[in-house]
Image (cartoon, rainbow, N blue to C red):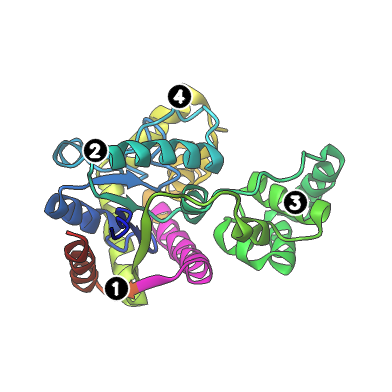
């Protein structure tokens, strides 16, 4: 008797604003599937506009998992995502439904599909020296130091995300090996699925246009007001507010930026982030890259038909 092939899991990846969410929704509707979000902001309740979270209507049409998982002041790590994501995939498999993992947070995807290196215990003395360097010379200098020893981690971590920059440097100094190398080695890969990676990689001009359109829409739909509400409830130091979009909106709330200045800065920083995402994915996985959604949809449809 021939062995039964494991169910197909399609991971739809690519830079922010490339159109992954819309394509994922169409594929899930066509295949009768369910979506597992792979986005480090969409896990937080209350971060709706700035995370481009799927609407209530979209979530009614297709189940979306790992959206609105925790409050924004609760800790939630890539390891937490990997654990919950695997539980979700096991449940989807039991129901015989095709899963689509959709999103651009590379480390979350790695945690889900490959497992994560847990890392050495924290070294407070080393962290203190690194924090002092950032305080004296600026976060950009600390990030450049990370880029020298671990360019892959530097590509996916924003310079402003000091906590993660410090942790990546801490791992390098304590183990003699970059954090990205540990992650590539993985821990315990996901079993029970055949994983295929499908990527959206629009041209730079097309991506910039999409980012500009999305940024204008977010501001029109209340990004600044949403940020003000979050600050009033949780305080200005809330970690998710350090992300692109919320960081600029918080500056508008403080009176440090005008809305038009915030819009320009969001576009600029999002383009930089998209470049880091592409660097990450091109180094990490064997992805079938597509220039547009139509090409990607045709490939995904063929994959699904082959398994039906």
Report which residue position mark 2 lands on. 95
Q: Which residues are magenta?
A: 262-288
Nearest-to-viewer mark from 2 and 1: 2
- Horizontal and vertical percent position of residue 51: 36, 45
Nearest-to-viewer mark from 4 and 2: 2
Distance of mark 1 from mark 3, alpha carbons? 37 Å
Task: Name the side, left or right, on which 103 lies relative to 161.
Answer: left
- Horizontal and vertical percent position of residue 31: 16, 53
Q: Are marks 3 and 4 in contact (CB under 8 Å)?
A: no
The tag earlier along the polypeptide, 1 or 3, is 3
Task: Name the side, left or right, on which 67 lies relative to 132.
Answer: left
Nearest-to-viewer mark from 4 and 1: 1
Q: Residues within 10 Å of mark 1 (few under 14, many from 20)?
A: some
Report which residue position mark 1 lands on. 206
Q: Is residue 295 positioned above or below 88 on the image?
A: below
Q: Are marks 2 and 1 in contact (CB under 8 Å)?
A: no
The numbered disc on residue 232 is 4
Report which residue position mark 3 lands on. 171
The tag earlier along the polypeptide, 3 or 4, is 3
Quarter of the image that includes the N terminus: bottom left
- Secondary structure category for the residue under label 1: helix
- Horizontal and vertical percent position of residue 25: 20, 51
Q: Is residue 98 magenta?
A: no
- Secondary structure category for the residue under label 4: helix
Q: Residues within 10 Å of mark 3 (few under 14, many from 20)?
A: many
């Amino acid at each position: 008797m021939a062995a039964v092939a494991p169910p197909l899991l399609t991971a739809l990846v690519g830079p922010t604003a490339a159109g992954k969410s819309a394509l994922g929704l169409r594929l899930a509707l066509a295949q009768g599937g369910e979506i597992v979000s792979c986005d480090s902001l969409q896990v937080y309740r209350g971060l709706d506009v700035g995370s481009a979270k799927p609407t209530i209507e979209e979530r009614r049409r297709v189940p979306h998992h790992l959206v609105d998982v925790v409050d924004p002041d609760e800790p939630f790590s890539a390891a937490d995502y990997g654990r919950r994501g695997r539980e979700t995939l096991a449940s989807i498999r039991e129901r015989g439904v095709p899963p689509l993992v959709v999103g651009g947070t590379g480390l979350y995807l790695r945690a889900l599909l490959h497992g994560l290196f847990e890392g050495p215990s924290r070294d407070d003395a080393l962290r203190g020296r690194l924090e002092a360097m950032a305080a004296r010379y600026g976060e950009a200098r600390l990030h450049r130091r990370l880029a020298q020893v671990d360019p892959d981690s530097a590509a996916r971590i924003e310079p402003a995300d000091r906590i993660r920059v410090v942790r990546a440097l801490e791992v390098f100094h304590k183990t003699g090996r970059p954090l990205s190398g540990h992650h590539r080695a993985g821990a315990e890969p996901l079993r029970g699925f055949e994983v295929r990676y499908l990527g959206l990689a629009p041209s730079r001009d097309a991506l910039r246009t999409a980012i500009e359109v999305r940024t204008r829409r977010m501001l029109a739909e209340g990004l600044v007001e949403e940020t003000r509400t979050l600050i009033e409830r949780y305080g200005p130091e809330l970690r998710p507010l350090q992300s692109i979009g919320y960081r600029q909106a918080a500056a508008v709330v403080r009176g440090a930026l005008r809305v038009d200045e915030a819009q320009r800065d969001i576009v600029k920083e999002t383009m930089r982030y998209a470049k880091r995402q592409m660097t990450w994915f091109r180094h990490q996985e064997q992805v079938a890259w597509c220039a547009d959604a139509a090409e990607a949809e045709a490939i995904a449809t063929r994959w699904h038909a082959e398994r039906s």
